[in-house]
C-alpha cells in the first residue's frame, strides 16, 4: 500500500505518454491526482471508525436513506478531517518535484513553481538568492490555504468526534 512515487514514476510517465498528455498541464494534473494518497484514506477510515454507530442507526430508524444520512450527519461531522486532508494534499501537491519534472521535460513553460526554482541552479554556479526568494514567494499560497482551514485542521488532528 505504501509504494513510494519514485518506484512508480516510469509506469506513470509511460501511461501519460501513451495517452498523449506528456508536456501538457492536464497530464501533470492527472498524474498528481490519480495516485490517491494512502495516508489520507487511512485518516478518513480512522475518523469514520470513531463516529458512534448510534448516529447512523438513529437516522435509519427515522427513515433516512444512505445518501441522506451521509449528507445530513456524516458530512457535517467530517468537516475537520476534510479540512486536514485538504491542507495536507495541497502541501504535498504544491511541493511535488519529481513527477512534474519528468512530465514537463521539453516544455518548461508549464512547470510548477517547485520545479521552476530548480532552474536557478546552473552548471557551475548556484543562484542562492534567487532560490531563497523563489522559495519564500512559493510558500505564500500554502500559508493562505492553511490560514483558511486552520480551525478544521486543529479539530481534525485532535479528534472532533467524542463518543
Image (tube, rainbow, N blue to C red):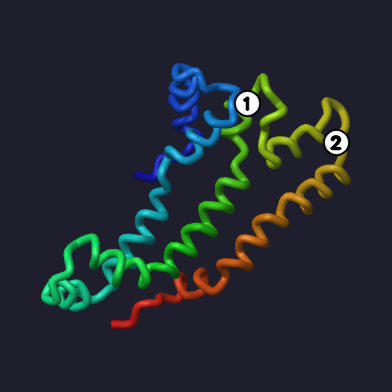
At numbered mark 1, what does the secondary structure look like: helix, strand or loop? loop
Seen in the picture, residue 94 relative to 34 is either above or below; the reply is below
- In which image quadrant can residue 119 be found? top right
Give neighbour class at mark 2: few <14, some 14-19, many 20+ (Cα, 10 Å): few
Q: Report x, y in % for residue 23.
A: 60, 23
Give the mark nearer the N terminus: 2 vs 1: 1
Q: Which of the two residues, 69 or 131, is positioned nearer the viewer here?
A: 69
User: Answer yes or no: do the residues labelled 2 and 1 have beta carbons within 8 Å?
Assistant: no
44 left or right, relative to 105? left
Seen in the picture, residue 117 relative to 43 is either above or below; the reply is above
Q: Which of the two residues, 30 or 4, is positioned nearer the viewer here?
A: 30
Inter-mark Cα distance, 2 to 1: 22 Å
- Residue placed under numbered mark 1 in the picture: 104
Q: Which of the two residues, 50 or 141, is positioned nearer the viewer here?
A: 141
Seen in the picture, residue 23 relative to 69 is either above or below; the reply is above
- In which image quadrant can residue 64 be found? bottom left
Rendered residue at 45%/17% (across/down): 18
Rendered residue at 52%/22% (across/down): 21
Q: Report x, y in % for residue 139.
A: 71, 54
Give neighbour class at mark 1: few <14, some 14-19, many 20+ (Cα, 10 Å): many
- Residue placed under numbered mark 2 in the picture: 126
Quadrant of the image for the N terminus?
Answer: top left
Rendered residue at 42%/66% (across/down): 81
At numbered mark 2, what does the secondary structure look like: helix, strand or loop? loop
Q: Report x, y in % for residue 133.
A: 83, 49
Amino acid at each position: 500500500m505504501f509504494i513510494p512515487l519514485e518506484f512508480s514514476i516510469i509506469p506513470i510517465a509511460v501511461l501519460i505518454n501513451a495517452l498523449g498528455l506528456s508536456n501538457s498541464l492536464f497530464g501533470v494534473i492527472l498524474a498528481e491526482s490519480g495516485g490517491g494518497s494512502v495516508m489520507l484514506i487511512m485518516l478518513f477510515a480512522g475518523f469514520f471508525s470513531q463516529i458512534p454507530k448510534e448516529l447512523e442507526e438513529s437516522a435509519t430508524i427515522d427513515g433516512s436513506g444512505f445518501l441522506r444520512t451521509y449528507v445530513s450527519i456524516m458530512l457535517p461531522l467530517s468537516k475537520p478531517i476534510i479540512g486536514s486532508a485538504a491542507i495536507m494534499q495541497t502541501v504535498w501537491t504544491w511541493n511535488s518535484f519529481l513527477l512534474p519534472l519528468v512530465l514537463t521535460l521539453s516544455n518548461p513553460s508549464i512547470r510548477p513553481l517547485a520545479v521552476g526554482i530548480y532552474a536557478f541552479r546552473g552548471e557551475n554556479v548556484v543562484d542562492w538568492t534567487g532560490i531563497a526568494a523563489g522559495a519564500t514567494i512559493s510558500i505564500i499560497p500554502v500559508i493562505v490555504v492553511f490560514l483558511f482551514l486552520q480551525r478544521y485542521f486543529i479539530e481534525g488532528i485532535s479528534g472532533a468526534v467524542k463518543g
